Image (cartoon, grey):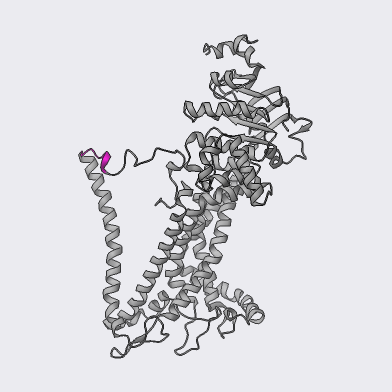
Amino acid sequence: MAKRIDVSDLNVYYSAFKAVEGVTMTVEPRSVTAFIGPSGCGKSTFLRTLNRMHEVIPGGRVEGKVMLDDQDLYDSGVDPVAVRRTVGMVFQRPNPFPTMSIYDNVAAGLKLNGVKGKKRLDEVVEKSLQGANLWNEVKDRLSKPGAGLSGGQQQRLCIARAIAVEPQVLLMDEPCSALDPISTLAIEDLIGELKSKYTIVIVTHNMQQAARVSDRTAFFNLAATGKPGKLIEIDDTQRIFNNPGVKATEDYISGRFG
Amino acid sequence: MSSVTGVSLADETPGPHGSAPLSGDGAGTGRLGDRLFGGAAKGAGIFVIALVTLVGVFLLWQAIPAIANDKASFLTSREWSVNDSNNLRFGIVELLWTTVTASAIAMLIAVPVGVAVALFITQYAPTWLSRPAASLIDLLAAVPSIVFGIWGLRTFGPVFEPVQNFLRDHLGWIPLFSDANISGGSTILFVGIVLAIMVLPIVTALSREVFAQTPITHREGALALGATKWEMIRISVLPFGKPGVISAAMLGLGRALGETIAVTIILSTLPDGAKWTFSLLNGGETFASRIANNAAEFDTPQKAGAFIAAGLVLFILTFVVNAIARIVIDRRKAFSE
C-alpha cells in the first residue's frame, strides 16, 4: 500500500515569489524521510506540494513533476481532492475538529469517502486509534470532544484521523513542535511503528528527532532571505549526521552557520 | 462564551484547567488606574442591567392595571376595544399570530440566504469581489426602515402580487394560503418577505464575521483529509460559525419582531370583527404596528395601558427567544472549545 514518491525539478511559487527551486528527490516506500533546514528554507512549503495542499493558499502554484509510483500528482486530469485522500497530512499544531467527538474525528475521513454502517466505522475507528497508540486512553470516552484531550493526545488523534482512510503516504509538518518531551517520545515511537505500513515524510526543527526517527534525511537551505530555498542534499540519515557530502549541511548540523 | 462569535483566543490555545491567572479581581493591583477602569467597567455593566430591569418594571407597572381591568381574556381574545375605560376589552392572540408568523417568514428566508451570502463572500468570492460585496451588504443595513416600507408599498408590492395570486390559486387548499381578499402588496406573507430583506444584512454581516475567523488549521485539517470545498465548509466552517450564526439570527429576529414603521405602512389592518383565518395572505397588525397605528390615542392611562401590555408581551417574546438561543448554544459548549 505504501508508495514511492519521485520529485523532479520542482519549483514552488507564492504568486510571483519563487519559494523553492529545483528540487529533485526520491522518497522510498515504507521509510521515514526527514526534512531539516533553517526556518524559511521552504521545507514545509515543499512538503505541502506532496499532497497538493500548497495550492490551497491563494497564489500557490507549482512547476515540475511529483510522481506517486507512476502517477503524476500535477497531471491536468488529477483531482487534488483524490490526491489528499491518498497522501494524508498531520500538522504542526494538533487540529482535531473542535465540534466533533473523538469518535467522529477519526470517522470524519471515512464518512467523506462514503463509508457507512456503524459496525464498519466502529472497526476502523478502533483500529486507527490503536494504530495511533491512543485507544487505551480514550476507549471509554469516545463520545467526548476531541479538543478536551491533552496536546499530545490530540496530535495522536490527528494521526489516527489521517491513517483511518488508509493513505499511501503520511506527511508530518513538525508534528511535535507544540508538544512536551513525553508526548514527543510517544509520537516518535508511533512513527517507528507506522513506517512498516506507510511512506512517511516528516519536517522537523529538532535534529535529534531527525536522527532518531528517520532513515533518510534531506537538508534544505536558502542563500539569503528573499531567495528561493533549495535542496542541498539527501542521503541516509547516518551519513548526513556523521559524514555529510556538503559543507553547509555539516555546518548546520553542528550549529556552525550564519 | 458571551462574545458574538462565540469563540475566543482560548479556542486556539488549549490552556490548563481552572480559572485563568488574570481573571476577576485577582489581577487588580489596587492602583488608581486599575480601580478607575475597573469601576468604569463595572458601572457600565450595572447601568445596562439596570436599564433593562427598569424597562421591564415600567412595562409591568403600566400594563398591570389595564390587564386587571380587562373584561376579555388578555391572552386568547381577538377583541380590541379600549375607548370605554369602564369596559376595557382587549386580547393579543391576533397580534401574536401576525407578529410571529411575519417574523418566522422573515427568518426562514433571511437565515439561509444570509448564511449562503456570507459563505460566498468568505469562502468562494475572489478578493476583488468579496470586499465590495461585503460593504454593499453592510450598506443595506443602513437603509432606514421607512425606505423599505415605501419601497415595499409602491414598488415591490405590485411586483409580488402575481406571485401571491399564484399561491392563492394553486395552493389555496392549504389553510396558510387560503384567500383572504387582501391585495398582494399588503399581506403578512409580503411583510415577512420585506422583513427578510431588512434582516438579511444583519445575518450576513455577523455570519461573515464568524466564518472569516474559522482558524486556517481547521480548514486545512478538513482539506488534508480529502474534503472537497463544500465538505470542508460543512466540517469546519459551519460548525465553527454555528454559535455566531445563531446569535446573528437572534439579532435579526429581534429586529423583525419589533420592526414598526415598514410593517405599519405595508400591512393592511383588518376591520373590527373580521373572520379569523390562518392564512398568510391575510392582513393584520403586529404588536408594534398596532401600537404605532394608535399612538395618537394614548389619552387615558387605562387606554395607554392596554397598548403597553401589548408591548410587554413583545418584550417577553424577545426575551424568551433569546433565552432559547442561549440554551441551544450552551448545550454544545463542550464541543466548541
Answer yes or no: is residue A228 visible: no
What residue range appears in magenta?
B25-30
Which residue is painted at 61% across and 45% down in the image? A107
From the viewer's perspective, is residue A79 above or below residue A173?
A: below
Percent position (x, y) of residue B137?
52, 57
From the viewer's perspective, is residue B6 above or below residue A89?
A: below
Number of numbered tags placed on the structure image? 0
Percent position (x, y) of residue B186?
53, 78
For residue B31: magenta?
A: no
Q: Nearer the viewer, residue B205 or B238?
A: B238
Percent position (x, y) of residue B26?
26, 40
Judged left or right of residue B267, residue B164 is right
Q: Nearer the viewer, residue A248 or A31?
A: A31
Q: Quadrant of residue A50?
A: top right
From the viewer's perspective, is residue B89 above or below residue B194?
A: below
Percent position (x, y) of residue B89?
35, 87
Q: Nearer the viewer, residue B157 or A173?
A: A173
Answer yes or no: is residue B235 visible: yes
Which residue is painted at 59% across and 52% down in the image? B120
From the viewer's perspective, is residue A124 above or below residue A30?
A: below
Q: Residue furthest right?
A: A70
For residue B29: magenta?
A: yes
